[in-house]
Amino acid sequence: MTTAAPERSLEPLLNRKYKYIDRKWDIVFWVTAVFVVAAAADITKLLFAGDWDFWTDWKDRQWWPIVTPFAVVIIPSALQYIQWLAWRMPTGATYTALCLAAASWVGRIFNWNWFGGFPTNFVWPISIIAGAIWLDWVLLKTKSFVMTSLVGGLGFSLIIWIANYTTLAPFLQPLKWMGLPITVADAQGIEYVRSQTPEYLRMIESGSLRTFLGETQYVALVFGATLAVAGYWLGQFIARKLAIWPIGRFLTKV
């Protein structure tokens, strides 16, 4: 007596097929998302930081470490929340940093160097990739947005300064111009004239911040790190209220 051979299950083949489709969809989604994420990060940086992260003579010791970390941590925080909630992937901040770096360099080289005639070392953008890796690493280890905002946000601001100081330091060296002590970055700003309105003109490092311990840089770094924590939670608010909430509110779950 012979028995019929059991039918071969099609489930492994179907799972393999859909797994292949899922992987292709993930690649297509994250490649096309580069443009949206880069635009959001760059626009946010321009709105909040503006010239403090554009011209070298605005990357000073006082306001640049305060304003810029707050501006550039918002979108990485938002995408970090979305990726962690949807896929448990602690890569949102790093992905945003890479997109922002690509968009910034393309804009600075083609628009401002080739067409505007400004040298690249006068319009170079900062790099936040090292700080973004730190943010994602803290989230991976703690699995807590509160700890990531405190430990990650503080470290994010300090790492940005450390990672970019090697590039910035030569432009902060003093020189004498027409009998006045200025920095190399100031000399660049005088040589390459930009269209400016009176409210845009300023003196580098003017203000009363030196009254704190007589040192601008360290006080600015600490205050900038505190603002980076606030910027991190602003990004969390954007992700939860403007990205995640509408999906759950207007799309019915099956």
Image (cartoon, grey):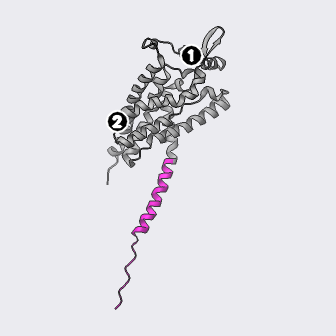
- Tell me where residue 218 sits by quadrant: top left
Query: Which residue is at 59% across, 34% downward?
Result: 107
**Label 2 element class:** helix
Q: Position of residue 128 (x, y in %)?
A: 50, 34
Query: Which residue is at 56% across, 28% downward?
Result: 166
Q: Is residue 36 magenta?
A: no
In the orientation shown, which residue stands out farthest toward the bottom? 1
Nearer to us in this view, 94 or 199: 94
Residue bearing mark 2: 147
Q: Amino acid at mark 1?
A: Thr
Nearer to us in this view, 241 or 60: 60
Query: Is the Cβ of the residue at disc 1 closer than 8 Å to that at disc 2?
Result: no
**Label 1 element class:** loop
Figure quadrant of the C terminus: bottom left
Q: Give the distance between the C-alpha atoms of the residues marked 1 and 2, in whole angstroms.
A: 43 Å
Please tell me how many numbered marks the rendered image carries. 2
- Examine the rendered structure and indicate whether residue 223 appears above or below residue 90: above
Foreground label between 1 and 2: 2
Side of 211 where 199 appears, left or right: right
Residue bearing mark 1: 197
- Tell me where residue 118 sits by quadrant: top right
Range covered by the magenta-colored residues? 1-30
Nearer to us in this view, 39 or 152: 152
